[in-house]
Image (cartoon, rainbow, N blue to C red):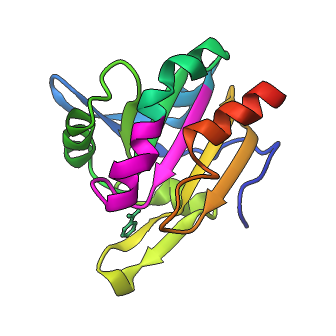
Amino acid sequence: MTISVGDRLPEASFMTMTADGPNKLSTADVFAGKTVALFAVPGAFTPTCSASHLPGYVQHADALREKGVDDIICISVNDAFVMTAWGIDQNVEGRVRMVAEGSALFAKTTGLELDLTERGLGMRSQRFSMIVENGVVKDIATEDPPTAEATGAEAMLDKIAAA
Ligand code: BEZ
């Protein structure tokens, strides 16, 4: 079953990069006590994700923070090394936090997995966005490749403004 508005995010483990290498974080580490703009992409460095999805959140990071968002987090079924390299390539520093979930456990336990085996990518995450308050889903949007509009930063800003 797919996670929906009002549900609490499941326990999962995420990886971020530190000066000492990849560091494991729990769901609580990432989401407790914060309003988080979370978005997921099917793959780091893939065309739509690099050309519009991630850049949109970089561009609108200040506007999202002005609306009360504490953290903007990009997750993907990639490892922390790849997510870090993609973040450097996209100049996300201080705007979007790059978080890896290389085993797709979060995608699977939220029902948001995407099987891209036929395209050579294996099990990935659907493209989605969520507004998460203290670990609880307040809004969710998903969309199929190749578009990144319903789950993009502008759509999220519109929803926050209307709330
Ligand atoms: C993309 O451009 O977003 C994309 C391309 C191939 C596989 C998945 C996503």
Q: Position of residue 103 (x, y in %)?
A: 38, 59
1 displayed left or right of 121: right
Q: Residue at x 34, y 82 (%)?
A: 119
**Is there any visible trace of residue 17 in the rendered image?**
yes
Q: Which residues are magenta?
A: 36-56
Quarter location, residue 34: top right
Q: Position of residue 126 (x, y in %)?
A: 53, 63
Q: Position of residue 47 (x, y in %)?
A: 32, 60
* For residue 5, above or below residue 91: below
Of residues 79 and 50, which is closer to you in this image? 50
* For residue 69, above or below residue 145: above
Q: Is residue 1 magenta?
A: no
Q: Residue at x 72, y 55 (%)?
A: 3
Q: Residue at x 52, y 53 (%)?
A: 106
Quarter location, residue 8: top right
94 displayed left or right of 152: left
